[in-house]
Image: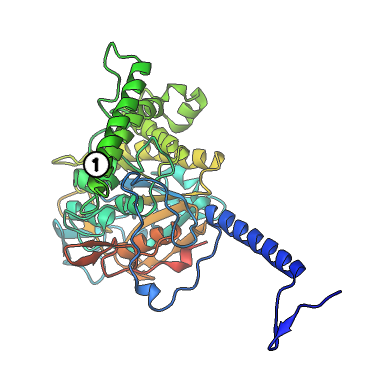
């Protein structure tokens, strides 16, 4: 057996060693590619300089929604948000406080003359809904949401969230965009910008308004802000699918496809005359997606193919409660969108209404009357959505986010039978990919008035969601008007304790 030649003390490769080294090296390259495709490849430790460098996705103008790998290991591939507009009360749902029951009818100690958003507060008032242990973990949940209560073993509660505002419009914007003012990109727009979509014939980001209407801040909740418009949410629901997608009368599917092919030929020739024109390429791409949606959207919005047992599971067949049946159909639509690879789906429960606000969770004047309406609308359909996602194996790749804009007071307003706005402490929960369950993080005080343990901000909430998707909230940015903008502004930290 010969030994490798040496020169100046350095071994040179012989033929066998060269072939063996080359073969194993190619195998390592192939393995790295496969791991990267499945998002299992660990990221290299970032140097001090690279950790500060903004991450701006490399976007092909001709395919702006093409799937892009996450910069860091991702626990989830897509997100489903269930947004209860109107500030759903934590005291009457998930934040059990025995002290409120014991002090019912008494002034809140130390806050006897408290004045909040809509004026002077009255006595501490217990929930009209009874709490009981739920799931194997025994989490206390009110009987307003019994079916969701059965699923607490799959939920990760954050009981210590705080907001910057006590007003609905800015509060919705803050939860949706990270800012209380108009003009900033929604969370879904940021995620679409960063990761694109895993489907070619549907939008990357879909917003599903409540059957009763839109939230108070309307389309700003799913808007693109200063990001390119292609990353905004496309809004439609099971009651009102996207309009103008049906073929005109007298035009066959074959004729339509032939027309599209010819139009693509013309567009490609036109684009060739303007190489590097990213706006033109993006505009052509948007029109081509719209054409593909003519086929995909009617199919996905048509729930007639859903079996009866699925409609029954969600309550979509409830003829006695049409509002619940409508929301249930929206929940089924949300599952179908996730199933087909839509990156970010936002499902709204509750709509803005003037006056009493019976259209959403704004329980100022008559909380029980309003919540007796809203509870059944949310409970069965949302619980069925979680069950269905889990049964289909979708929950292992999907992060489900249940949220609202802020919380409610432990007292009733003077002269009313409802709770005022409270940004000092409220509850949201997560389920599915990337989070511990059952798990509870943080706490409010004995009256659920202020967050006192592991106090968290909406910035932290957003930073954590981005981390679960393999994104760094400090580095994902967009340069706008001389500023490196990001979802979390200059704030936020990941809530590491809740990550699985």
Figure check: 492 above or below 404: below
* Viewer-nearest residue: 113 or 74: 74
Q: Position of residue 409 (x, y in %)?
A: 26, 58
Location of mark 1 (residue):
273
Q: Position of residue 460 (x, y in %)?
A: 35, 65
Please indicate, yes or no, whether residue 350 appears anywhere in the rendered image: no
Q: Which corner quadrant of the image does residue 424 belong to?
A: bottom left
Q: Which corner quadrant of the image does residue 99 belong to?
A: bottom left
Asked which colour scheme the image uses, the reply is rainbow
Is residue 444 found left or right of 14 in the rendered image? Answer: left
* Viewer-nearest residue: 40 or 268: 268
Which of the image's four quarters has the N terminus?
Answer: bottom right
* Viewer-nearest residue: 368 or 429: 429
Q: Position of residue 173 (x, y in %)?
A: 22, 53
Q: Which corner quadrant of the image does residue 489 belong to?
A: bottom left
* Residue at the limit of the structure toward the bottom, as seen here: 8
Figure check: 358 above or below 221: above
Please indicate, yes or no, whether residue 414 appears anywhere in the rendered image: yes
* Viewer-nearest residue: 295 or 242: 295
């Amino acid at each position: 057996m010969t030994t490798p030649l040496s020169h100046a003390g350095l071994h040179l490769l012989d033929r066998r060693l060269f072939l063996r080294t080359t073969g194993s090296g190619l195998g390592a390259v192939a393995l790295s590619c496969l791991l990267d495709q499945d998002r299992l490849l660990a990221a290299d430790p970032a140097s001090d300089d690279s950790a500060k460098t903004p991450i701006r996705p490399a976007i092909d103008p001709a395919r702006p929604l093409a799937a892009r790998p996450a910069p860091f290991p991702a626990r989830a591939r897509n997100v489903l948000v269930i947004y209860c507009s109107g500030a759903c009360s934590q005291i009457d749902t998930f934040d059990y406080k025995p002290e409120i029951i014991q002090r019912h009818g008494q002034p809140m100690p130390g806050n006897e003359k408290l004045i909040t958003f809509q004026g002077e507060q009255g006595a501490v008032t217990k929930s009209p809904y009874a709490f009981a242990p739920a799931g194997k973990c025994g989490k206390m949940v009110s009987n307003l949401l019994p079916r969701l209560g059965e699923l607490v073993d799959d939920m990760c509660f954050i009981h210590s969230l705080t907001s910057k505002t006590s007003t609905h419009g800015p509060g919705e914007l803050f939860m949706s965009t990270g800012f209380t003012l108009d003009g900033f990109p929604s969370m879904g727009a940021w995620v679409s910008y960063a990761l694109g979509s895993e489907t070619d014939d549907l939008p990357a980001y879909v917003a599903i308004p409540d059957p009763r209407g839109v939230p108070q801040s309307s389309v700003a909740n799913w808007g693109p802000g200063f990001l390119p418009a292609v990353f905004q949410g496309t809004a439609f629901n099971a009651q009102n699918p996207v309009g103008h997608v049906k073929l005109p009368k007298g035009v066959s599917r074959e004729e339509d496809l032939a027309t599209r092919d010819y139009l693509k030929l013309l567009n490609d020739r036109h684009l060739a005359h303007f190489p590097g024109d990213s706006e033109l390429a993006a505009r052509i791409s948007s029109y081509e997606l719209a054409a593909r949606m003519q086929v995909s959207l009617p199919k996905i919005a048509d729930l007639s193919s859903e079996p009866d047992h699925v409609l029954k599971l969600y309550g979509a067949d409830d003829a006695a409660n049409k509002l619940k049946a409508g929301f249930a159909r929206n929940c089924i639509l949300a599952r179908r969108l996730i199933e087909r690879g839509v990156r970010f789906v936002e499902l709204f429960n509750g709509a803005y209404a003037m006056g009493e606000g019976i259209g959403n969770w704004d329980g100022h004047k008559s909380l029980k009357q309003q919540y007796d309406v809203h509870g059944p609308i949310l409970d069965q359909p949302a619980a069925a959505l979680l069950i269905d996602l889990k049964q289909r194996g979708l929950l292992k790749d999907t992060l489900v986010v249940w949220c609202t804009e802020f919380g409610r007071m432990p007292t009733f307003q003077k002269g009313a039978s409802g709770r005022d706005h409270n940004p000092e402490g409220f509850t949201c929960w997560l389920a599915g990919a990337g989070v511990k369950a059952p798990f509870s993080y943080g706490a409010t005080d004995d009256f659920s008035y202020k967050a006192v343990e592991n106090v968290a901000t909406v910035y932290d909430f957003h930073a954590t969601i981005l981390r679960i998707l393999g994104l760094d909230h400090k580095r994902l940015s967009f340069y706008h008007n001389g500023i490196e903008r990001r979802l979390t502004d200059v704030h936020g930290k990941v809530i590491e304790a809740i990550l699985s």
